[in-house]
Structures are given as structure tokens and as C-alpha cells.
Amino acid sequence: MKQKIHNDSTKNLLSSVVKNAPYGMIAIDNFDQIVLVNDQAVSLLKLDAKPNELNELVIFDQIKHIEQLHLKLNQIVENQYRDFNLEALPFDDKFLNIRGRKIVEGYIVTIEDITRDKEMEMVALNSMLEGQELERTRIAKEIHDGIGPSLSTIRLLLENLSSENNRLDNAKFSGQVSEILDMIDSLTGDIRDISHQLMPKILLDFGIIPALENLVNRINRAERIKIILFHSILSDRFPELIELGLYRICQELINNSVKHSSATEVQVQLIEHPESLILMVEDNGKGFDKTSVMKENPGVGLINVESRTNAFGGNFILDTAISKGVTATIEIPLEK
Ligand SMILES: Nc1ncnc2c1ncn2[C@@H]1O[C@H](COP(=O)(O)OP(=O)(O)OP(=O)(O)O)[C@@H](O)[C@H]1O
Ligand SMILES: [Mg+2]
């Protein structure tokens, strides 16, 4: 008798725990029948009955509308109930983490709504992309305000020198030439400073691969799109400007895939050949029609990729069509 009371109170405690759990929970016995289920599970999985009406019903019949979960549970049964995790499963405008755990009496499935976490990740990703835009504005401003005026002054001095050429004695002439040379030196210093300030520190310190890995990891953390990086780089470092150029090109192409393509995956490959570096960025998204985009909404991103590539004497090929994804190939010659 005592034992019975104990069993009842344990059972009550258990159903109260399940009922009040902060996530959805379904307990299934070894005959695949639902033993316990809470309101949260019913609402998150949009089950077609109240918790008490689901008792003793076979789980598979209740979750047919959630294809991936149905499939997973079927596989689990075939494999004699193994633990499983379905992470960030999109369902009914939500993202759910669904986990299955084997217990002696059967199987426990928990369902957690992680939509809010996902939304926060999207906000983080968007602010990272906005950060890149801000950085571009800063680059433009520093070049405009820093380099532009110095070049104008050098031009003025040279004009002056050429118009006064015949009237100047040698000493004055060399004085003015050395003034111009000083300005050019200081300009070279400014350009170097700006490019170092603008170069991500990891790129400056460790080179292109760690910098790309870092970029890719940051985007992958948001789990919205999967970026896969392959490389066959043997050399330790490449010329600083080539590293920066390739990094910016990669940033722009990945950014385009994230912004425009609806792709699930982007493959980035950087291959070192004896005489050149080849970068390929390929997404499996919706692609686009080059002619109409060029006419209707040309951005500056792809034009910059082209001009950066040309500045290194390289080649840029953009292969895309509607529904065919986008493959961008950039080849940059290396001077050996
Ligand atoms: N990976 C891609 N998938 C689908 N469409 C793309 C992709 N990359 C570019 N596009 C299309 O090409 C257009 C031009 O791209 P581009 O990078 O030049 O400009 P943008 O991204 O619109 O703006 P920004 O000047 O900020 O880069 C985009 O607006 C988009 O329509
Ligand atoms: Mg762009």
C-alpha cells in the first residue's frame, strides 16, 4: 500500500514537472505511444489535440506534418532509439531545437523555441554588414580628406615650377623640387598609415588565411548561411596589398551572397599556383541576369571587385544566370 502511494506521488510530481517545464516535452514508451506531453509541445509542434487526448496515441501519427522530425524519429526507431538533436529546425515561422533522449522506459523528446536567439543572431549579422558599410564610408572619407588635398598641393607646386622654370636659378629650382619630393614622401607615409589603419589587424599580423578564416567564422556563427573555406596556400605571406585586395574582394562577394542570393551555402577557395593566386567564391543561390542588373540596379560592389582585380593586372570572371547561383573567379598574377 505504502509503495502505491509512493508511486502515485512520484507520478504526480513527474506530470507536474512535465506540465511546467519551460520547453515542450513528450515522453514515449517502448511501444512508440505517447505517455506524457505538455501544452508547450502541443503548441510548438502544432499537434492536433489537447495533451490529455494524446495519451497512448502513436507518436508517428501525430507529427506527420513535421517532415524532418517524422523522418528522424523513423530513423531512430530503425536504429533502436539513439539520441538525436535537430538544431534550429524551421517550422511554422519559428526555429526549434528538438532533442531526443533514450531512457529505459522509452524515449523523451524536448522542444525548445529558439526563434528569439536566431533573431538576435540576424541582428548581429546585419550590424556586422552595416559595420562594413560604415568602414567603407570611413575609407572614402580618409582618402578624400587626407590624400586628395596633398595631391592637389603637389600639382600646384609642379605647375608653379613649370611656369617659372626659365626664371628660377638652380638653387631655387632644386629647393622647390625638394619641397615636392618631401610632400610625396609624406603622402606615401599617409597612404601607408591609412592602409594599415584600414587593414584588419589579423590580416596585417597573420596574413590572408587566418583573416579569411576569421571572417568566415564570424558569418557562420550566425548560422544563416554556411560558408566553407578551402585553400591550398603554401607561402607564408603575399604582398600586403594583394592580401588586402583579396580580403576585400572576398568580403564583397560573400556579402553579396548573404545579401542578395538566398543561398544556403557559399564555397570560398583560394588556390596558390606557381605564378598566380586564384580565388573562387561560389554560392548556390538564385543567381541573377547580368545584363538587366547592370542596366537597372548596378551597385559599386562588383565594379570595385573588377577594378581591384585589374589594379593587380588580374582577371575577374563572373559566371551567373537566374537560378544558377553565382561563381566569381579572380586570378591575380604573382611576381616571383
Ligand atoms: N551572389 C549574388 N546572388 C544574387 N544576386 C547578386 C549576387 N551578387 C550580386 N547580385 C546582384 O547584382 C547586383 C549588383 O551587385 P553589387 O555588389 O555590385 O551591388 P550591391 O550589392 O547591390 O550594392 P553595393 O554597392 O553595396 O555592393 C545586386 O544588387 C544584386 O541584384
Ligand atoms: Mg555588393
Image (spheres, helix red, strand yellow):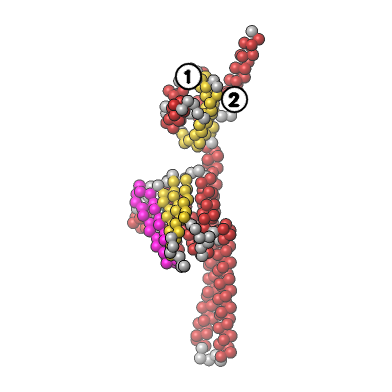
Count of numbered tags: 2
Mark closer to the observer (1, 2): 1
| Residue at mark 2 | 20
Seen in the picture, residue 32 relative to 331 is either above or below; the reply is above
Q: Callout 2: helix, strand or loop?
A: helix
Say if the magenta span includes residue 312: yes
Position of 36 compared to 327: left or right? Answer: right
Residue at the outermost right position: 2
Q: Is residue 332 above or below residue 212?
A: below
**Position of 138 compared to 286: left or right?**
right
Measured as percent of width and height from the top left, residue 113 is found at 53, 33
* Residue 130 seen anywhere in this rendered image of the structure: no
Magenta extent: 309-332
Q: Quadrant of the N terminus?
A: top right
Query: Residue 221: image x %, image y %?
Result: 53, 45
Q: Residues within 10 Å of mark 2 (few under 14, many from 20)?
A: some
Question: Label for residue 31?
Answer: 1
Cβ of mark 1 under 8 A from ligand 1: no
